[in-house]
Amino acid sequence: MKKTRLAALAAFALAAAPVAAANWAVIGPSQSVAVAGSTMTVTPRTPWNKATHKLGPKAEAWTQDGFTLNELDFIGGVGPGEALVKERNKKDKPLPKFSASMTPPDIVQMFEATDRILLNTSLFEVDKVEPARLGGRDGFRFEYHYVVQEDEVRRKGEARAAVVGGKLYLINYNAPAIHYYDAGIDEVRAMMDGARL
Amino acid sequence: MTGRGRLAAALLAAACVSFAAAGPARAADSKPRLQALEPGAPPPWTPGYQPLDKDEKGLWMEADEAERTLKASNFVVHDEALNAYIRSVLCRTVGDDRCHAARIYVIRTPFMNASMAPNGMMQVWTGLLLRVRDEAQLAAVLGHEFGHFEHRDTLRLFRDLKSKTSAMAWLSFLPYGVGLIAQFAVIGGAFEFNRDMERDADIEGLRFMTRGGYSPRAAPTVWTQFRAEQDATAVARQQKSRKDRNGGFFATHPNSAERVQYLTHAAQGIPNPPTRFGETEYRAAMASWWAPLIDDQIKLNDFGGTEFLLQSLAGGTWTPELLYARGELYRARGAPGDFDKAAGFYRQALDLGSTLPELRRGLGLALIRAGNAEDGRKAIKDYLAMKPDAVDSKMMAMLAGGE
């Protein structure tokens, strides 16, 4: 089953092994922390768990209750020609690549295609795209919902992004539409609002 | 789940998802054939048919369980007209006496496949519907699947595998996927049989479709098209085509080149074959589905394969909808020159009189990326005027504002 992005990547690497990412680092509350090996910092209100198995060279993923219940991804400075997350199957399932000249709707489209490919789903819809700020920079936010096969849980997601110096910074949150999304979104939005670049 | 249950489940996933996987060409004629089942047993489409023994009961139980899950799936397409149409093609193909045994589920997934489980659960994936060009091609696939069902191939395979202890060990690792990409099915030797079964099912499908009045020439065409699409994907990705890829352990199906060859040969051997292809009927039945299914395909990031599919759908006549899709495809790739080409496709569609608001959206975004911001902003304003409540209206308004 590939319910989450990290699981999709891990499952490909480890064939039939259960969702990997056995190692975690606890992120303490109320402290500023640099994410995704970049200059982006965020300050969570409550403790989170960072998977030490990275989503990609410039991406990491956090959770509170496990990735099937809440997932917070940080993309820190993806450059031109790079994918959002690590490409595990370049040959058969290459991921779309970032370009510095992309408009916000282009980036949303790239995000959607990446998720559809990683999660093997056709049920993914963007619900809203609008201007917003990230780390004091002009950027945008978008909302979406999706379902993954064999899991069938309706999930909602929200992301905030900005292109700075030709590189993409993005914070993405998603969780089941029932209970978990609403339970986590306030803290996540506060983290997005307070992020520094 | 017990060990036995896992095996049965794996078989459902493996043997039933049985249409599209490609394996290596080989001299299969020298391989032993699977045993036929008890002579005189009623075919499984007989009204009131019940599984006959422990093995078959176990398989049915697994299939029934899988079907309960599938019924509630978000991926099942509930469009009544589409479902009724596919059923009508199946009934015409295999006959009214047989087709009642199938329960058809159209599954929203962009890959080319179909399957039928021993209990009559039939899955038709939307990726298949996007790829067949007429009713006769669809009939070839549905007939093939019904052939597996009629010959109780899953049960034959199950019995064969049960006698192989090493197979049991392997199978305990297998995932259980309904509708998912479960082609990573099983193990070398045992699946020599599967290739024979696939060949038999291909020929059975040919017989069914011919009896139903469809041109048997459509059967090999399904495969020549798919091979051409694989070539197109590979060219755009600068790779070697996967069409003749050696499936290794996972080679459950005859190579597609081999399929084209024997299906063509068999079709030519049918005296006075019917000539119906049903292209017009197929296009009409699919009319409202092209746009979403093409959208699913575009988002797979497979430029070559998608361009091939669009060209083949157009058949030389580009409708506004197909031009829009082509614009989206080129715009998504964004290679040098693609934005100008995309803008050209959107404009052609507008010239044909299309009022689709998204044409203006695509045109605007393509022009901005092509360096013509002024015209781009104008097109986006047109889009917003036509669709003020679009989900991206605030973002697009900002882009149209020029900052």
Image: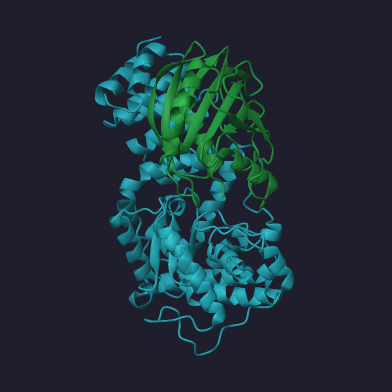
Q: Quadrant of the C terminus of chain B?
A: top left
Colour theme: by chain
Instruction: Residue at 56% x, 84% y: name it.
Output: B37
Chain A palette colour: green
Q: Is residue A183 left or right of residue B165?
A: left
Residue B342, x across and y down, in percent: 44, 27
Query: Considering only vertical position in the picture, is A169 above or below A185?
Result: above
Q: Is residue B342 left or right of residue B170?
A: left
Q: Is residue A118 left or right of residue A139?
A: right
Instruction: Residue at 63% x, 15% y: name it.
Output: A39
- Comparing A93 with B207, the one in front is A93
Q: Can residue A178 be seen by looking at this rendering?
A: yes
Q: Quadrant of the N terminus of chain B?
A: bottom right
The mark tally for this picture is: 0
Residue B394, x across and y down, in percent: 34, 20
Query: Considering only vertical position in the picture, is B164 above or below B374?
Result: below
Residue A105, x across and y down, in percent: 43, 24
* Quarter holding residue A167: top right
Query: Considering only vertical position in the picture, is B228 above or below B203?
Result: above
Chain B palette colour: cyan
Query: Considering only vertical position in the picture, is A130 above or below B111?
Result: above
Q: Can residue B315 be seen by looking at this rendering?
A: no
- Comparing A107 with B221, the one in front is A107
- Comparing B100 with B228, the one in front is B100
Residue B29, x across and y down, in percent: 68, 74
The furthest residue to the bottom: B40
